Amino acid sequence: MKGKFGQKLKDAKLAVTFRDVILVPNWVEVEPKEIDLTTRATVNHKLNLPFISSPMDTVTEAEMAIALARLGGLGILHRNCSIEDQVKMAAQVRRAESLIIRDVITLSMTQTIGDAIDLMQKHQISGLPVVEGEKLVGLITGRDVRFAHRTLRVGDVMTKKLVTAKEGTTLEEAKDILHTNRIEKLPIVDDNGTLRGLITFRDIMLRGRFPNAARNQEGKLLCGAAVSPFDLERAKKLDKHVDVLVIDVAHFHNANVFRSTKNILKEIKADVVVGNIGTYKAAEDIVTKLERVAGIRVGIGSGSICTTSEVAKAGSPTLFAAAQVADALREHGVDIPIIADGGISGSGDIALALGAGSSTVMMGNLFARCKEAPGNLVAIGGRYYKQYRGMGSASAMARRYSMDRYSVPAKGISEGVEGWVPYKGEVATVVQELTDGLRAAMGYAGARNIPELWEKAEFAVMSSAGIEEAKPHDILLPGEA
Ligand code: XMP
């Protein structure tokens, strides 16, 4: 025993984080605009940008998830709400756009034009196929109902001469058919005339407007949602609507959490991301004890709203966590994408996190600033801010659903704070700034793409004088005057 505690301190690892480190400039053969930022969010889902928004109730609801997926990233819907509300958000993302709509809203011939108008308004759509049983018999469009009386029968007003297409119609073919026939809706039917789906002009237009969008194989915007490891019912209900399920717990490396995650992994079809973890050993236990894990979320206590490290003096800074986990995965020959989560304050931090082996970064603070985030907009001292709060903060916990992440009732302390972040406008603007900065950083590192950054990134630890020098200095900045 003699000398053991002293030795432990001597052996202490250096848990470096974003502020301590810089990327060392490298030999460069690539220009920033040629850099490829495509990556994987999970084993089966690709992104066109390495950005994921945090499952927090002031960051990601349907509006943020739709906007971010259209830009090429991914939103993870928060779980601080009822199962029904979270499923509703996921369904909203699903319906936002797709090449073929599968859950088509239909009418029967005996319904009235009033019913048709109500359905169109409720779902904000402009046309409804009419079916008898499952067979397609007509189509009602906005034009058909405009001057028709509400009490008329659908069967008397609908268009009966229909242009349809078969399953397997490509985007280009659909475009051609819509254009040639001057129509906006193209029902997909099988050989028996059964309605199988619907292609709309609007969805095709949206594809053109968002060529970089992250989509699943069906052409729908990619969507993720968070669940507690102990909420199998929520996981099962969301599974039908999302591509990615994130097991959302502050400290995943825990026997009970592993046990119940096993059940979720058995029952769920979506790609499952587990986390958060921060150590080599936790990653090793995941790859040896759990099957079908499709992503690992890393970093404990680095979040801008976290007080975990302060309260508990336990944690693993995101950069340190990413490197530990990436090494464990490599050494076990396992290819699972890493999500670096917490503490990202700009594009430089993103480059560092990716350089340390992660495939994407998760951000709460930077996305909470955007118009699409659900937090309230407030004016303070003539400037605009948005509300942002930790999911372990007292007020978020008061909504009971996130209690199990930070176990406040048991410990009687909160592990998060709430406050305001400066309002930045649309998420597209924030993403553009981050993308430009990330390309610049990867340019300095000489990396053409993210896997090349894993190989080429070289880090240097800065002294505290260096950290000061790296900011603007010896100049009076506007606003400080
Ligand atoms: P940023 O730095 O982007 O971090 O604001 C977002 C991440 O922080 C985590 N998170 C919390 N951590 N107490 C914590 O210790 C909390 O109340 C809390 N809420 C969120 C989470 O991983 C998120 O993605």
Image (tube, rainbow, N blue to C red):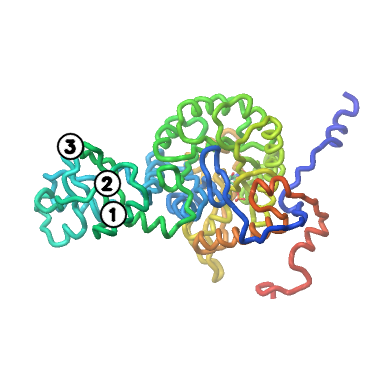
**In the rendered image, which residue does mark 1 sit on?**
177
From the viewer's side, name the closer residue of 410 and 333: 333
Q: Furthest-right residue in view?
A: 2
Tag 2 secondary structure? loop
Q: CA distance from mark 2 to mark 1?
A: 9 Å
Q: Residue tagged by mark 2? A: 165
Q: Is residue 117 left or right of residue 265?
A: left
Q: With respect to residue 350, does 1 lie above or below?
A: above
Q: Quadrant of residue 421?
A: bottom right
- Residue behind label 3 places its C-beta within 8 angstroms of ligand 1: no
Residue 105, x across and y down, in percent: 26, 45
Disc 3 marks which residue?
A: 133
At 36% across and 53% down in the image, what residue appears?
Answer: 172
Q: CA distance from mark 3 to mark 1?
A: 26 Å
Asked if labels 1 and 3 touch by Cβ distance under 8 angstroms, the answer is no
Q: Secondary structure at mark 1?
A: helix
In this view of the protein, which residue sits in the foreground, 311 or 154? 154
**Which callout, 2 or 1, points at the residue further toward the start of the chain?**
2
> Along the polypeptide, which appears first: circle 3 or circle 1?
3
> Could you tell me residue 270's position as x and y percent?
47, 35
Q: Which residue appears at 46% of the width and 50% of the height? A: 65
Instruction: First in sequence, mark 2 or 3: give its number.
Output: 3
